[in-house]
């Protein structure tokens, strides 16, 4: 008996209802086509619909697997998906309904500046100077302070079918907080920035989603607690945004990414208005599948994270070393030998700055001294003094074998901090290097052994195209960022074409279009090639089950139907 029939036998549901459910799912049922009073009963996330989503995937997926041969050209999930693609609701509030929603928001939040519709403000909240993607102003910005505030906003949005866009640190480069074309509600989570509890003995803390990772670590330091949160994306990033994009940072080579175990649980407001907490605070649990990870990388499309429990790591002494190389190939090729040595676990960070980045850092950065403008590796070595000394000796031996012309430690802690700050502000330094230029930041990632080839081919391609660029990278885990500069439409076209070539080059090497920035608007079109049609269909099925009205950050993450997405 099939899985579906065994489920029916136990629940008493008829096969006719199964057929009806399949027909409804395959036709992309319009959950709310006649106005706010005809909305579905989603008061407790419509669990029956989620059950059917999983049941349909299971019952149809097994049949597809058994009857179809994989296509060689497809991604990792190479089997063909259901012939009827999952479609999302796009019928949202009319202008009159939108105004009614805004009026109800004002009644729910009567305090000054809690609900804002001033044109410049809603425009600023929907755009970024560091993003090249088209931007749209929001209709209204609501400044949340508690989980209960978010529930109120979600309930009003659902009532009138108004899209919701969460907003945190505004550091996204992929258009995650851009407004929706039909106008939307932007929930500003930046005011929810409190640390609620610190459990030093357990090595974790609970905070609101608007807390910034830098502020968390500074608070721990001020309190004399020898722990820190090791995920370190761009300056200003908030915990909610870090969860939404599945971030990482320079520490990833040692501590991993957001998709590891650094978020023990999250509190989420679902599209139904229901509040859930994904699990308890225990370090590990085998109770069911990991619903916390369902929201990591979901980019606010399944619910709005309001709180999180973060696992902390002990602070370990570090020293920063720098090695210069005659070319970027030799620099990158040295990294894996270092990491695969017995001393590899003592490497907290391994960062690449190419010769152009070093030049930009000298000209437009905050460096207190001039550094050699050569392809450079920065190492952050951690451990007891003897371990650092032994690791440094091995690192120096290996990089010298790969052609390093200079290896030295930062002379003081202040110099080490300054050097690392310049690395963290690479984008700012690059933009300051060429006044008036804008930047397109890429984020490809490949298996580490493929990185030398990818970096070499990318540098050659950018040089041949006449594009001014810098390269920085978390080369220990195969991730690098090319920062491409342009000043006019002609240069923008060159940059755009080069980015597409770079992404396809990475995917062809069994890599990813995004190592840590997320998908947003900018990388949707690559997901079919990277993940395969079946995996994308599963993602869309889950999205539709959890958010049938498609009000949670629509237009982000999920690619357009296949025939419309292959424009490059």
Image: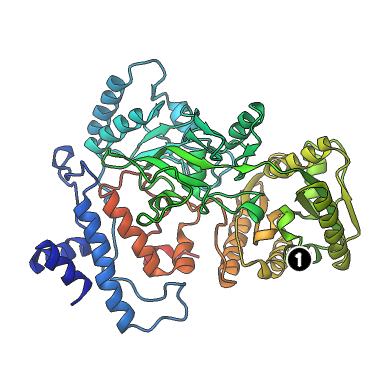
The image's colour scheme reads rainbow
Residue at the image point whose x is 37% and y is 57% from the top: 289
Report whether 154 appears left or right of 211: left
Quadrant containing the N terminus is: bottom left
Percent x, y of residue 339: 73, 62
User: Which residue in the protein does label 1 denote?
Assistant: 341
Figure check: 484 above or below 179: below
Circle 1: element type: loop
Report whether 16 appears left or right of 95: left
Figure check: 327 above or below 257: below
Percent x, y of residue 274: 28, 39
Q: Residue 60, located in which quarter of the rendered image?
A: bottom left
Figure check: 71 above or below 355: below
Report whether 1 appears left or right of 177: left
Q: Is residue 360 visible?
A: yes
Residue at the image point whose x is 85% and y is 67% from the top: 402
Residue at the image point whose x is 43% and y is 27% from the top: 119
Residue farthest toward the front in the current orientation of the protein = 201
Q: Is residue 349 visible?
A: no
Q: Residue 99, located in which quarter of the rendered image?
A: top left
In this view, the residue in front, 175 or 408, is 408
Neighbours of disc 1 within 10 Å: few (<14), some (14-19), many (20+): few
Percent x, y of residue 452: 72, 68
In this view, the residue in front, 540 or 526, is 540
Residue at the image point whose x is 69% and y is 59% from the top: 476
In this view, the residue in front, 457 or 386, is 386
Percent x, y of residue 15: 10, 69
């Amino acid at each position: 008996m099939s899985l579906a029939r065994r489920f029916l036998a136990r629940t008493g549901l008829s096969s006719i209802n199964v057929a009806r459910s399949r027909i409804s799912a395959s036709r992309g049922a319009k959950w709310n086509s006649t106005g706010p009073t005809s909305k579905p009963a989603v008061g407790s996330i419509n669990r029956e619909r989620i059950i059917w989503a999983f049941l349909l995937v299971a019952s149809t997926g097994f049949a597809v697997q058994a009857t179809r041969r994989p296509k060689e050209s497809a991604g990792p999930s190479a089997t063909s998906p259901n012939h009827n693609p999952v479609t999302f609701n796009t019928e949202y509030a009319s202008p009159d309904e939108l105004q009614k929603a805004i009026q109800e928001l004002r009644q729910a939040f009567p305090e000054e500046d809690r609900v804002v519709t001033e044109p410049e403000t809603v425009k600023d909240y929907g755009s970024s100077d560091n993003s090249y993607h088209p931007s749209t102003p929001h209709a209204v910005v609501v400044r949340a302070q508690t989980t209960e505030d978010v529930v109120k906003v979600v309930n009003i949005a659902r009532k009138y079918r108004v899209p919701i866009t969460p907003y945190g640190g505004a550091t996204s480069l992929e258009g995650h907080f851009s407004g929706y074309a039909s106008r939307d509600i932007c929930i500003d989570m930046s005011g929810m920035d409190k640390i609620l509890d610190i459990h030093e003995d357990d090595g974790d803390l609970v905070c609101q989603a608007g807390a910034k990772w830098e502020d968390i670590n500074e608070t721990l330091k001020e309190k004399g607690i020898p722990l820190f949160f090791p995920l370190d994306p761009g300056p200003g990033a908030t915990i909610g945004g870090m969860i939404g994009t599945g971030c990482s940072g320079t520490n990833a080579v040692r501590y991993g990414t957001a998709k590891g175990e650094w978020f023990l649980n999250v509190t989420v407001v679902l599209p139904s208005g229901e509040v859930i907490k994904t699990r308890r605070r225990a370090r590990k649990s085998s109770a069911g599948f990991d619903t916390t990870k369902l929201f990591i990388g979901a980019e606010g499309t399944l619910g709005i994270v309001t709180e999180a429990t973060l696992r902390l790591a002990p602070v370990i002494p570090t020293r920063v070393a720098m090695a210069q190389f005659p070319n970027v190939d030799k620099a990158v090729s040295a990294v894996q030998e270092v990491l695969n040595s017995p001393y590899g676990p003592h490497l907290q960070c391994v960062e690449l700055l190419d010769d152009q980045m070093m030049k930009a850092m000298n000209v437009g950065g905050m460096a207190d001294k001039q550094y050699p403008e050569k392809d450079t590796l920065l190492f952050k070595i951690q451990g007891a003094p003897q371990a650092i000394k032994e690791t440094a000796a091995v690192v120096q031996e290996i990089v010298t074998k790969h052609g390093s012309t200079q290896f030295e430690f930062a002379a003081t802690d202040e110099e080490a901090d300054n050097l690392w700050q310049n690395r963290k502000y690479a984008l700012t330094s690059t933009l300051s290097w060429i006044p008036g230029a804008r930047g397109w930041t890429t984020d490809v990632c490949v298996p580490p052994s493929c990185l030398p080839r990818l970096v070499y081919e990318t540098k050659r391609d950018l040089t041949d195209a006449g594009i001014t660029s810098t390269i920085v990278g978390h080369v220990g885990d195969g991730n690098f960022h090319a920062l491409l500069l342009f000043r006019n439409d002609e240069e923008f076209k060159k940059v755009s074409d080069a980015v597409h070539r770079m992404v396809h080059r990475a995917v062809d090497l069994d890599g990813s279009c995004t190592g840590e920035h997320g998908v947003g608007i900018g990388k949707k079109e690559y997901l079919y090639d990277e993940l395969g049609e079946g995996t994308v269909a599963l993602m869309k099925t889950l999205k539709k089950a959890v958010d049938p009205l498609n009000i949670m950050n629509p237009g982000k993450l999920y690619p357009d139907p296949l025939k419309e997405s292959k424009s490059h």
